[in-house]
Amino acid sequence: MSLNNLLEKKPWIGWAVFLGSLTAVFLLGLLAASIMERRSEALIAFAPKVQIKSLDPRNSKWGENYPREYNSFLLTQEGNFKSKYNGNGVVDMLEQAPAMVILWGGYGFSKDYNQPRGHFYAVEDIRKTLRTGAPKSENEGSQPNTCWTCKSPDVLHLMKQMGIENFYQGKWASAGPSIKNPIGCSDCHDPKNLNLTITRPALVEAFARQGVDINKATHQEKRSLVCAQCHVEYYFKGSDPKKPGTNLTFPWDQGTTVDNIEKYYDALEFSDWTHSLSKAPMLKAQHPDYEMWKMGIHAKRGVSCADCHMPYVAEGGIKYTSHHIQSPLNNINQSCQVCHRESEEVLKNNVYDNQTKVTEIRERVEQALVRTHVEAKIAWEKGASEEEMQPILKLIRQSQWRWDFAAAGHGNSAHAPLESVRMLGHALEKAGEARLLLANVLNKHGVAWPIDMPDLSTKEKAMAYVGIDLPKLKGEKEEFIKSILPTWDQKYNEFEKSLD
């Protein structure tokens, strides 16, 4: 049957073909219009509105050219997220876990340790923390400028003006008037092309000592390396290798595991401080997030820090990286479910299950270490000798180093849960060995073991036991904030005018 005959007998077929063709043409038109619109959006989005100078620290200035990224960064001000064990609000961790006051006895963290907030608060929080003290003038202060290194892009200007070593050697309060902007755009981006770039010399130096030029890293590698500029274990190296100095240094020369870093410190006979109770030469882990991430499954599968904490999002025709840097648990849909097909509830509970197991053993280590420090204190008071205490102090150092490495990395139970449990298992074992040796020393000096422990159930009681006068510290800091910060802000405003 010919087509004409078919259409004569069934005329609706012709109309169907006509309408189908019309619909297809209409849809193709919409697609073409959408493509053109999205191209126009992209051109508008990436057309610079202002020229950003090299090292310009003002995030708001960058925001004029990149409003989507900037507006998402502003969301790091939020403080209402809370997971099972962590969050982004103001939480006094020493109040929640008084044992840490004892573990850090004689060190700044025993005075003040809060749950970390968003990057937006980096400068505000370091200004207010009791760990930076209360200097009376710009030429005083117990901490070096090095403490500012990861808190603000303003640091880059100071390093360029002063030289890196001179910057490190300055006093914390002296740099205060030159620092106002929190962690932001120029910390990680080249203003000419927005490429990721490494701006902190300590990271470049750490890789260079291993024969690696990280400036040649791929874009995907840099999506983790820019985070590794700060989220790492570090120490302040001095001319005397046994004592802290001012030069920011990453102790990776023998590797990045807890054991390799310990070997590095042991070879130098380095300690961050001497514990006020046990007299053990201690190491303080900072926040070894990058090192722990490297030992987890995500790093082994090529997943970067930004993939989970700063996922890509789409808005109209624009795909960009969210700069609302946060826990993936507050953004499971755009973070975890890009790769994982399980429901949000299942994925969340998987993380919580790991966190619960790690937290259980971590708290057991804390209690064992508290007892060890107190028992060592009593042993010294009863006349124990250096020779008797030396193997005990070494075990205390080794145990607490592993506990701290596991506890200080805020995402460890998600980044590398097996490694976290391994470290804590070794920490518990070494604390137990130390206590067995202490039992013999105490019995030798006429003290029955186990001893009756003092009441350390609250932050206040624990602080009193290690000799911290908290009201005095708070009063000094509040007076410092009240008297100095207006002057700092005024001086910074004068400097800011010169940037344009």
Image (spheres, helix red, strand yellow):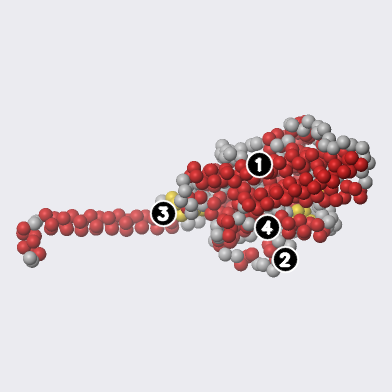
Residue 399 on image: x %, y % = 76, 48
Q: Secondary structure at mark 2?
A: loop
Q: How far is mark 2 from mark 3, CA to CA?
A: 44 Å
Question: Badge 3 is on which residue?
Answer: 317
Decide which of tag 4 and tag 2 comes sooner along the chain.
4
Nearer the observer, disc 2 or disc 3?
A: 2
Q: Name the one closer to the observer, 387 or 106.
A: 387
Question: Badge 4 is on which residue?
Answer: 200
Give, as a three-letter code, the residue at label 3: Gly
Q: Secondary structure at mark 3?
A: loop
Q: How far is mark 1 from mark 4, CA to CA?
A: 36 Å
Residue 167 on image: x %, y % = 75, 54
* Mark 3 surroundings: few (<14), some (14-19) or many (≥20) residues within 10 A: some
Decide which of tag 1 and tag 3 comes sooner along the chain.
3
Marks 2 & 1, CB-CB < 8 Å contact: no
Give, as a three-letter code, the residue at label 4: Arg
* Mark 2 surroundings: few (<14), some (14-19) or many (≥20) residues within 10 A: few
Nearer the observer, disc 2 or disc 1?
A: 1
Nearer the observer, disc 4 or disc 2?
A: 2
Using the image, tell me which numbered label, if any, was put on residue 209.
Answer: 2
Decide which of tag 1 and tag 4 comes sooner along the chain.
4
Q: Is residue 253 above or below residue 369?
A: below
Residue at left offset 8%, top offset 57%: 10
Q: Is residue 382 above or below residue 303?
A: above
Give, as a three-letter code, the residue at label 1: Glu
Q: How far is mark 3 from mark 4, CA to CA?
A: 34 Å
Question: Badge 1 is on which residue?
Answer: 360
Q: Secondary structure at mark 4?
A: loop
Residue at left offset 11%, top offset 54%: 12
Q: Secondary structure at mark 1?
A: helix
